[in-house]
Image: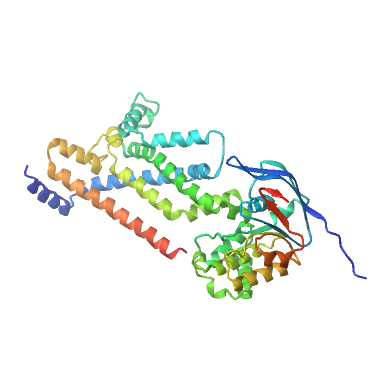
Amino acid sequence: MDFQIALMTSIENILNLESDYIQIIFTSLEVSFTAILISFIVSIPISSILATKEFYGKSLLIVLVNTLMALPPVVVGLLLYIVFSSQGILGSYDLLYTVNAMIIAQTILITPILISLSQVTLTRYYHKYNDLLLSMHASYTKRVFTLVWEAKYALTINLLVGFGRALSEVGAIIIVGGNIAHLTRTMTTGIVLETSRGDLANAISLGITLITIALFVNIILHSLKVYGEKNLV
Amino acid sequence: MEKKTLSKIIIQLNDICKKIADRHVLKNINLDIYDKDITVITGHNGAGKSTLLKILAGLSKETSGVLKYHNEGLIKSSGFIFQKPIFLNRSVKDNLLHALSCIGKSYTYSEKIISKHLAYYNLTYLADIPAIKLSSGEQQLLSFIRSISLNPEILFLDEPTSNLDINYSSIINEEILKLSNTIKIIIVSQSIDQIKKFTNSPVIMEGGKII
């Protein structure tokens, strides 16, 4: 297929906004946003403890988290496939080829990234503010809440990195989601399918949409960060 | 006949040592701190003054030795003023509110106290300005207000006027003198004028030791 024709058709596809197409975008956003939200909720307490407490095995834990950051998505997908398959430990929950399985896969992939980045961010704030907070007799909980609040704009950037990773992930979700039309097909798994089928127009339209959404979300969050840093209060 | 009360020891340091990254910053410090007068710690850069002050205030832990507070509640009711003021990324008022919330004061009480202090120092107009945007003099004064808002029994000051002009230095010095009538003050200073103003017998440090 001529590339120029494929590009024109892909733009037409986007403008037509067919229900299949909207379903794919919705599934992608549902999976990525839910995964990033869960990861954020899980990562903040863990990274806060790593940043503010000294304990036996801390260095080892940090090395482990950093190693998990480099987890190959297909390996995570494969392991979850084994766990979720009818013979697997969680087979009875019928998670395989569901959106929930995809959310779990993405959460596993993103959480170590958010823990690692947030730990570095919060350690920086800990060194900046800990003496002050101690001198004001703040309790441990109060100190942690203050650090997280003060670091909120820096943590937003970490969230962006995690969201980017989630939105562009394909290896794990294609295995546990199965790339089923109207059910578990996302923009990335759709691109893989359409490219392998030789339907470049559909693949390009999904690619353009994916990049546009990523750009849009990044602009919103970045503006939020800039606004926050300018106003400071 | 005038009733004279005797000074009593409130903090006692026995053989205090502090090692930071294989460097002996404090070496066998023995010191008694009394409840009366202002205690001034002085010495050249790198003598260990700030480290000693942080250990006294409980912000840093000694590597060895014994640090004894004769009244355990004393250190829980202390304030600390840093050489370079540290502020949260918030307005002047919110920084003060946060400080009071750390010791469990209610919002209504805190607002009242803050308004009173800001008015006393003619800083009410700065209440809504981000603290980090103030001049260094205003920041140190705000740091001072934040500490005294906590209503401390003891105040630790680490070279509070080293970055200030004469005007702000004299304001801070006068306030320290006034406060010393009601609370214990321990100050690290390298300013001869300040030392002379506050004490006749400063604690002089050199190379991590008291000389």
Give coordinates of residue B126: x percent, y percent: 53, 72
Which residue corresponds to the image point at 43% horizontal and 65% vertical from the top-left? A231
The front one of A73 and A190 is A73
Image vertical order of residue A99 relative to residue A16, above or below = above
Give coordinates of residue B149: x percent, y percent: 65, 65
Which residue corresponds to the image point at 35% horizontal and 56% vertical from the top-left? A221
Which residue corresponds to the image point at 58% horizontal and 65% vertical from the top-left? B140
Q: Is residue A188 left or right of residue A46?
A: left
Res. A69 image quadrant: top left
The front one of B65 and A135 is B65
Give coordinates of residue A47: x percent, y percent: 48, 43
Image vertical order of residue A150 relative to residue A60, above or below = below
Give coordinates of residue B4: x percent, y percent: 88, 65
Which residue occupies the extreme right position in the image?
Answer: B1
Q: Which quadrant does the N terminus of chain B fall into? A: bottom right
Res. A78 image quadrant: top left
